[in-house]
Image: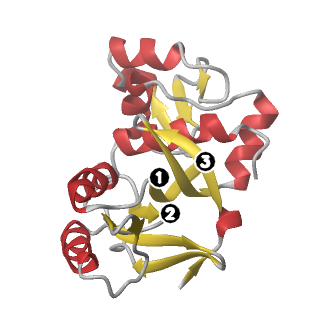
Amino acid sequence: MLLAEQSLTELRLRGQQVRAAVTVFADEACRRSAVGLGAVDSRVLLSVLHDLPVDLPVPLPSLDAHLLRTLQSAPPGVVDQEDDQGILVRRLVPAARVELVLVHAARGISPHEWDSAVRDASQFAPFCARGVLLSHFGSERAGHATCSPDHPDFDLLFLKARFYGVGVATQGPAGLRWLLEPAPYRPLRHSAAQWLFHEQAWRQLGPDRS
């Protein structure tokens, strides 16, 4: 299956330069733009917001002093506080979601690089689908790199990648193609850490991205 290269963008996530497919939620992106709000990548603030309902009033007396201080120091557009009614309303929701991350193995994959490439891609397991992108494949035998999927080294790479749910894609003249599709992303739970990951992507995409 071919991958749409125009749907991928270069991002730096978790210390790695990757290519990512990102869904932008236009309503929230426009709302943030209207109030001058960009990415919100404070782990503390997102942890507090994560436990609040969206667009529903929360009585101020139900929040302890630490939570109140955190929310009251948030930038405009994150929450609305109605002191006369004694309520606070969470407005912030994610503006973007990373659907897929491809870790680029610039020198191709040799037997010595399998563990590293798959491990680098595996760290994105809590956040999205993930894969390894090969610009070419093979060990440097006979002075050149082999590119055929029938090469025996592919079996070992596929075995390890399939075990960890990591896809394998290759770059060719026709574009990007899956040799092994990644496991579907099915989070066991949603967390503030996942939200932070997507906010870090949104900060790089910019508020005008749609």
Query: Around disc 1, counting alpha carbons within 10 Å, would you say few (fewer than 14), some (14 to 19), or many (20 or more)?
Result: few
Q: Which residue is mark 1?
A: 106
**Mark 1: which secondary structure?**
loop
Identify the image's colour scheme: rainbow, by chain, secondary structure or one colour.
secondary structure
**Mark 3: which secondary structure?**
strand
- The answer to the question of whether label 1 and label 3 lie on touching residues, with beta carbons closer than 8 A, is no
- The answer to the question of whether label 1 and label 2 lie on touching residues, with beta carbons closer than 8 A, is yes
Residue 120 on image: x %, y %: 31, 49
Query: Around disc 2, counting alpha carbons within 10 Å, would you say few (fewer than 14), some (14 to 19), or many (20 or more)?
Result: some
Q: Which residue is mark 2?
A: 135
Task: Compute the Cα span from label 1 to label 3.
Answer: 14 Å
Q: In the visual, does 210 lie left or right of 47?
A: right
For marks 1 and 2, the one nearer the N-term is 1
Q: Is residue 55 visible?
A: no
Q: In the visual, does 115 lie left or right of 185?
A: left
Determine which quarter of the picture holds residue 38: top right
- Amino acid type of the residue tagged 2 in the rendering: Ser
Q: Foreground residue, 29 or 145?
A: 145
Residue 144 on image: x %, y %: 42, 67
- Amino acid type of the residue tagged 3 in the rendering: Glu
Task: Compute the Cα span from label 2 to label 3.
Answer: 16 Å
Q: Nearer the viewer, mark 2 or mark 3?
A: 2
Q: In the visual, does 197 lie left or right of 116?
A: right
- Amino acid type of the residue tagged 1 in the rendering: Ala
- Name the residue: 36% across, 32% down: 47
Residue 10: which disc? 3
For marks 2 and 3, the one nearer the N-term is 3
- The answer to the question of whether label 2 and label 3 lie on touching residues, with beta carbons closer than 8 A, is no
- Name the residue: 35% across, 26% down: 62
